[in-house]
Amino acid sequence: MPENLIFSKQEYQQRVRKTKEMMDKYGMEMLLVMDPANMNYLTGYDGWSFYVHQGVIVSLNMENPFWFGREQDSNGAKLTCWLPDDCIYGYPDKYVQSRYTHTMCWVADLLREKGLDKRSFGVEMDGYWFNARMYMTLSTELPHATLMDGTNLVNWIRAVKSTAEIEYMRQASQICQSVMQTAVDEIDVGVWEKDVAAKVSAAQIAGTDEFGGSSPAIFPIMPSAERTSTAHLTFDPDRQYQENDVVLLELSGARYHYHAPLARTVYLGDPPEDLRKTADGVVKGLQETLTFIQPGITAEDVEERWREVIAHSGVVKPSRVGYSYGLNYVPDWGEHTISLRPGDKTILKQGMTIHFMPGIWLETYGFECSEPLLVTKGGCEKFIEFPQKLFIKHGR
Amino acid sequence: MPENLIFSKQEYQQRVRKTKEMMDKYGMEMLLVMDPANMNYLTGYDGWSFYVHQGVIVSLNMENPFWFGREQDSNGAKLTCWLPDDCIYGYPDKYVQSRYTHTMCWVADLLREKGLDKRSFGVEMDGYWFNARMYMTLSTELPHATLMDGTNLVNWIRAVKSTAEIEYMRQASQICQSVMQTAVDEIDVGVWEKDVAAKVSAAQIAGTDEFGGSSPAIFPIMPSAERTSTAHLTFDPDRQYQENDVVLLELSGARYHYHAPLARTVYLGDPPEDLRKTADGVVKGLQETLTFIQPGITAEDVEERWREVIAHSGVVKPSRVGYSYGLNYVPDWGEHTISLRPGDKTILKQGMTIHFMPGIWLETYGFECSEPLLVTKGGCEKFIEFPQKLFIKHGR
């Protein structure tokens, strides 16, 4: 166990207790957690080793979860997890990306040894980290187990943040503020896009004078010009910003992998009338929607409110306008739980953290202005104070 | 189709032809490619949208593959793929991370519309991007299709690089050289680890005076002190380097997502005798092994040779000593094909690119010194010229 845990051992144990409570409600005796954010949440494990198979297994009949991963990463588990060393299991290197055997054969052997091979066993069916081959192998290797769907079970527990988590998210927000300011300051006609992106990346890691950042779960999304007509492109490595460029910025700070995403838009020159109009409509809609968010309303209520307030502005937004976020690794800082869209009945609670993100992508350009929010006792609070507007720059 | 493709349309079409040839050999009429590197390889698609479900489908009876993804990303496909616009399909936002429906229902509908629902259909069973739920949904929705394992089918085609690809890998290598030099220069007693990591991240994106980089598939692996006893930790965001720190550096440059990974080790002060001995043993083993690599030998031959040359040095390395690398996105720059380890019968060919990576992780520290290599007509060639040694620094 490391000398300095990011959270208290009690906080980690509380998370495990909540996981077991949820498992018990679903009639699930064991849970295989392979999502690196869920692994980190339950154990503290933190390494870029998720490109090989690894996981944490929670069992109702055992006090502590146990970690498994590649043998060469097991020291990393001992250095970052709160678990006792005898809860850390490393598998031999021959299982790594093998054509002849599979890590899930090794996992099945381990479960048989522990007498855990005849249980109802939740797996993250629809996550990034539990693939089809793993499922098929476990099905074959554990004929007496009942595989169940445990997708997002831990993610839902993560949706409400503790005081300590919110503190890290505030620190991430301070980093994000500096990251966004760097981008807005540096973008200018004739400047290489790559040079701004480099400064943005450096600001994400350097953090503040008091603390450092961590690599965000999504690379800097900062397309320019026509590339702003879509949602997830980045800078052009061989292009300089030009007069009349729109530049979208969707950037995050992160502190111990807790995020603070923020989107803003810069225009180099005199923006066309329709872009100004879109910007005004989105910013007004954003501001009015924020006054509406409070505990007790549902995720779909928020989206409906947004649609009402922008109804007369000409802005049309056919995709969800926000989602829950927090602790994460690549490829997404979203938590895959709450979506602000029709049909999502989740009741907002104090301690939930939402990225309200009404991005607009039209045929030839886009506009983004978002806010990361904390649902508070009586409403919601912005994590970041950054002007809500189209940033217009007229060259040096 | 974009004005400037990264490769010629003919090169992309040749890749599709090779994919169809391999599919045909396996008796596979269609292939669903969801790995973002494979999607990029076949179509040019380049966006950070792989956090939602998306893919490319290759069918033996259709000239062009087709792309599907979230509607808001389809403009991105039109802006980055060589495919005609009528090969780009966007799905409605309601399919994104939904509890009520699944993107694979939409895919099955599309295949039925096209009359492609009764074929033998390869899927990337053991990849990161094809999860258990996708498999189960496709199985149910396409009862007349025969699902087959297409894991790494495109990856194996990627293993041999074209002249144009090698050129991008040389550019990535130039970036990596500057990244590693930055790290070695900046690490010193009293310097914040986060500040070196920030400069490293900036150098990865800024590239050279002539061209920019792209975000590598793995974050900067740069642990210090005890954290070097394991393979995949990074910098400590709140720590300054101290006298007698070992610092491992496993860093990459990337150009259009083509990588150049390199590992080196720095010691701050007078290294202990056993670290010097390990370093000497590894460097000697590395150099001798490189003279042995040439077309015609197998991957396991390389590892055997390495084991022979280090046999008397006291160095023990129980994991694979290298792997194929090239084009990739998170979470791995490795290609999941060739592994330098016992049992891998792959015959090395001209144009293959290997990261020879004999990392050593002992109980209290580690040592790394690696080389990215191109297999040439008569041997192999290092992509990067960087001194092969333990870098010893004695403070400012």
Image: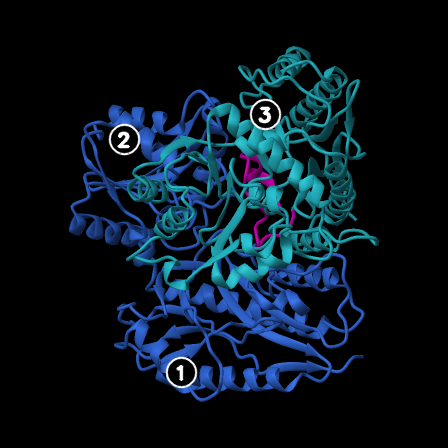
Chain colours: A cyan, B blue
* Residue A365 in view in this figure: no
* Residue A163 in view in this figure: yes
The CA distance from mark 1 to mark 3 is 53 Å
What residue do we see at 79% from left, 20% from top?
Answer: A377
Residue A322 among magenta residues = no
Q: Position of residue A289 (x, y in %)?
A: 71, 18
Q: Compared with residue A109, is residue B147 higher up or lower down, i.e. above or below?
A: above
Disc 1 or 2, which lies upstream in sequence? 2
Q: Residues within 10 Å of mark 1 (few under 14, many from 20)?
A: many
- Mark 2 sits on what residue? B139
Mark 2 falls on what kind of element?
helix
The CA distance from mark 2 to mark 3 is 28 Å
Q: Amino acid at mark 3?
A: Ile
Q: Quadrant of the N terminus of chain B?
A: top left
Q: Which mark is residue B289?
A: 1
Q: Does residue A152 appear to the left or right of A205 in the view shown?
A: left
What residue do we see at 71% from left, 48% from top?
Answer: A6
Dominant secondary-structure state across the stretch colored magenta: loop
Q: Quadrant of the C terminus of chain B?
A: bottom right
Q: Does residue A205 appear to the left or right of B293 in the view shown?
A: right
Q: Residues within 10 Å of mark 3 (few under 14, many from 20)?
A: many
Q: Which mark is residue A338?
A: 3
Q: Amino acid at mark 1?
A: Thr
Mark 1 falls on what kind of element?
helix
Q: Chain of mark 3?
A: A
Mark 3 falls on what kind of element?
strand
Residue A238 among magenta residues = yes
Report the span colored magenta.
Answer: A220-241
Q: Residues within 10 Å of mark 2 (few under 14, many from 20)?
A: some
What residue do we see at 53% from left, 31% from top?
Answer: A153
Of B39 and A395, the residue lying toward us = B39
Q: Does residue A162 appear to the left or right of B309 in the view shown?
A: right
